[in-house]
Image (cartoon, rainbow, N blue to C red):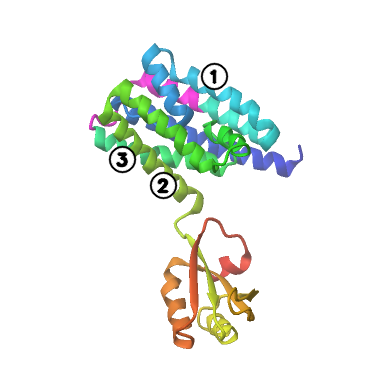
Amino acid sequence: MNKVTLKLTLFRMFWITIGTLIAGFSLECVLIPNEVIDGGVVGISIMLSYLTDYSLGIFLIVLNLPFIIMAYQKFGRDFVFLMFFGVTLLSVFSEIFHRSNYIITSDTLLASLFGGIILGAGVGLVLKSNASLDGTEILAIKLAKKQPFSVGEIIMFFNFFIFILAGFVYGADKAMYSALTYFIAYRVIDLVLQGLNEAKSIFIISSKYDEIGKAIMKKLDKSVTYLSAEGGYSGVKSKMIYCVITKIEIQKIKEIVNDIDPASFIAVENVHEVEGKRYKKNN
């Protein structure tokens, strides 16, 4: 392992430590005392710990171990090492917080809302450090190759089943609070991974593509890309404009396009991550 790789690994381990510390706090001091669970392997571990009185940390390691082994072939040694490191730390921190007997709130709604936010922040930091705390996604990736379902659909099915089980263990109300927590955590994870400055990609189809492209570059100081396009019905060949912008620039770029060609076609999509000096320089 060279110095650059070692430095990157240590950097990731640091943020995984912070992330698992936050996640462990959310589980043991906010969610579990109020009988609210997360989805995936973590949710199953919480229910098994509740039903058997064994430590949550034990189930986190035991249930994730097969998925960690499974991940080696798909994601490689570095990912497996960081995932095992993260799961182990989460087990340790959950045990520490469990023994502290500290409960931040006894209000189930508040626990669901803020527990989801805190948990999502912790898990997001772990995911951003190229690791995972839950083997459900790894299993879903493997199953998606053989089944006519996407990874997201398989994960959703697993979690739906888990929350149904939670209804039998804790009651229907707590199961619904758990689903709310999962949704909030999921959105916060996206926020941590994508950042507040979410980018948008925009496609513009117009016969006046050259004039529109020059106007965007001049008025917004944005770089544009011209893509070759051909009309499906007309068969007419033309150019399509592609550009990456921020959310606050969407309305401005629409005004520019509509002023030049009101008959143009505009499509806007979310961009989860943007790399490039040109984009960062303009933002």
Characterize the local packing of mark 3: few (<14), some (14-19) or many (20 or more) Cα atoms within 10 angstroms: many
Characterize the local packing of mark 1: few (<14), some (14-19) or many (20 or more) Cα atoms within 10 angstroms: few
Q: Are marks 3 and 1 in contact (CB under 8 Å)?
A: no
Residue type, numbered disc 3: Leu
Residue 62: give x, y in percent of width and height.
Answer: 54, 19
> What residue is at 70 percent from the left and 33 percent from the top?
73
Residue type, numbered disc 2: Arg
Residue type, numbered disc 1: Val
Quadrant occupied by the N terminus: top right
Q: Which mark is residue 102?
A: none
Disc 2: which residue = 187
Mark nearer the N terminus (2 vs 1):
1
Mark nearer the N terminus (3 vs 1):
1
Residue 206: give x, y in percent of width and height.
Answer: 54, 81
Mark nearer the N terminus (2 vs 3):
3
Residue 247: give x, y in percent of width and height.
Answer: 44, 66
Indicate whether 163 appears above or below 118: above
Query: Viewed as shown, does residue 232 lie left or right of 119?
Result: right
Whether 92 is among the magenta residues is yes
Q: Are marks 2 and 1 in contact (CB under 8 Å)?
A: no
Indicate whether 84 appears above or below 152: above
Does any portion of residue 245 appear in the rendered image?
A: yes
Query: Viewed as shown, does residue 90 lie left or right of 119?
Result: right
Characterize the local packing of mark 2: few (<14), some (14-19) or many (20 or more) Cα atoms within 10 angstroms: some
